[in-house]
Amino acid sequence: MKQVIATAPKELTIVDVPKPELAAGEILVQTLVAGVCGSDLHAIQGLHPFVPLPYKPGHEVVGIIREIAPDVDGFSIGDRITVEPDLPCWDCKNCKNGNENLCERLQFFGCGYPQSGMSEFWTLSARRAHKVPDSFTDEAASLIEPLSTPIHAMKLASLGSKDLSGKTVVILGCGTIGLLTLVAAKYFNAKTIVMTDLLPNKRERALRLGADAVLDAGLAGVVDDVRALLGDSADVVFDCVALQPTVNQAIALADKGGTVVIVGVPEKDVSVPLPIIQDHQIRIQGSATYLPSDFKDAITLLGSGALDVKEFVTAVFPWEQTQEAFESALLGDQVKVLIRFS
C-alpha cells in the first residue's frame, strides 16, 4: 500500500509499505480523507515540540472499516468512522480518572506513531473509533476531530458547564482552530466574541462566520482597542497562536480576574508576568486535545448545522499530490486542506 512520510523540512515522500495486519481489539480501515492539521504544519517545518522529523502524518482522518477483529463489538464492515488519535495506556492515574488525554504514556496516531491516516490502510484500537453519521459528507466528518479541540477548551474555560452565557470572549488567531473556536464559543452562548489576526482575508472570514468584531493583531493599540469594544477586561481569552506576543496580549486582555486558555501549539517556551498573574488572579489554563465526550459534542454541533463546512474545507487534493497539499496549507490562505485517498 501507499504511505506518506514527512522525511525532511517541507518534504514529503510516498512509499510502498506492507498493508498492516489486524490484531486483537483492532479494526482495519481504508482511508477516505485526511486533513492537514496546524500541528502537521509545525512538524513538517521541524517546529513541533513533540513531533520530530521524520514522521508519518495524518491524524485528522475519515475512513471505512474493512476488517474487524473477532473480539470487537459495536462496529460493522463498511462503517464510516473518524479517529480519536490520542492513544492512552488505560492504566495510569489519569486514564483511570477519565483523563486519558493526559495519559502518562500517551502515544498519538499520526504524530510520531508507527501508523498514520495518510496511508491507504491502517489498524487501530476500536476504542478510538467514532462512527460518522450517514448524513455527514466526508468533508464534514473531517472536521469532527479538529472541532473537538476547541470544544474541550470551552469546557475547561467554563469549568465543565459548557455554558458561556454572559461571558465576553477574545480569540487570538483566525486560522482553522481559531475559527472553530469561534463556532464553539457561539454554540456555547458567549455574549460577545472579538477576534484578532494579522491577515485581512482571515479577519474577513471570521466576520462572515459571526465574530462581533475582528481587529488587526499587529496594531500597536490592539489590546486597548479590544478592551474598549468589550467595555472591560475579557472573561476568557483563547490563544490559538501561542507565541510570545499573543501570550502577552492574552494576559493583558484577561487582566484582571480573567482566564487565558492556551489552545495553539507553542513552538517554544514563553515568559509570563508572574507577579501580575498572581496579584490580579489571572487563570492560565492549558488545553490538551480532547476526550470522547468532546467528539460526541462535535458530532452534535456539526449535525445542528451551526457550522458551514464550505467555509472550512477550502481545498481537496488527491493523495498523489500530498506535497502540493502541504505547500498550499503552508501558504496560509487556506482554512482546512484535505487529502483524498479513495
Image: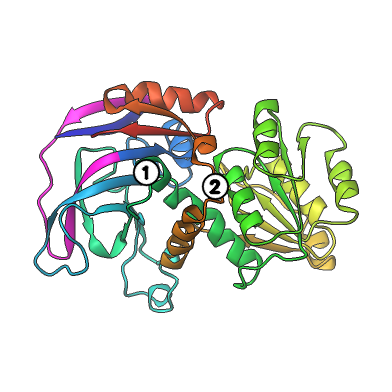
What's the colour scheme?
A: rainbow
Q: Where is residue 318 in the image (x, y as percent from the top left)?
A: 30, 26
Q: Is residue 9 visible?
A: no
Q: Which amino acid, mark 2?
A: Leu
Please tell me which residue is depicted at 69% across the width and 42% down the height of the picture: 244
- Tell me which corner region of the image, top left, top right, bottom left or bottom right, holds residue 280: bottom right
The question of residue 23 being in magenta is answered with yes
Where is 120 relative to 287, above or below? above
Please tell me which residue is depicted at 61% across the width and 68% down the height of the picture: 162
User: Horizontally, is 248 left or right of 74 in the view?
Assistant: right
The local secondary structure at tag 1 comes to loop
Residue 137, labelled with which disc? Answer: 1
First to last magenta residue range: 11-32
Q: Position of residue 185 (x, y in %)?
A: 65, 56
Q: How many labels does the image show?
A: 2
Q: Which amino acid, mark 1?
A: Thr
- Tell me which corner region of the image, top left, top right, bottom left or bottom right, holds residue 106: bottom left
Q: How crowded is mark 2: few (under 14 residues within 10 Å), some or many (20 or more)?
A: some
User: Horizontally, is 10 left or right of 32 in the view?
Assistant: right
Taking depth in this image into account, of 25 and 339 the one nearest to the observer is 339
The question of residue 284 being in magenta is answered with no
Residue 290, labelled with which disc? Answer: none
Q: Find disc 2 in the rendering and name its residue.
A: 307
Taking depth in this image into account, of 130 and 329 the one nearest to the observer is 130
Say whether disc 2 or disc 1 marks the residue closer to the N-terminus.
1
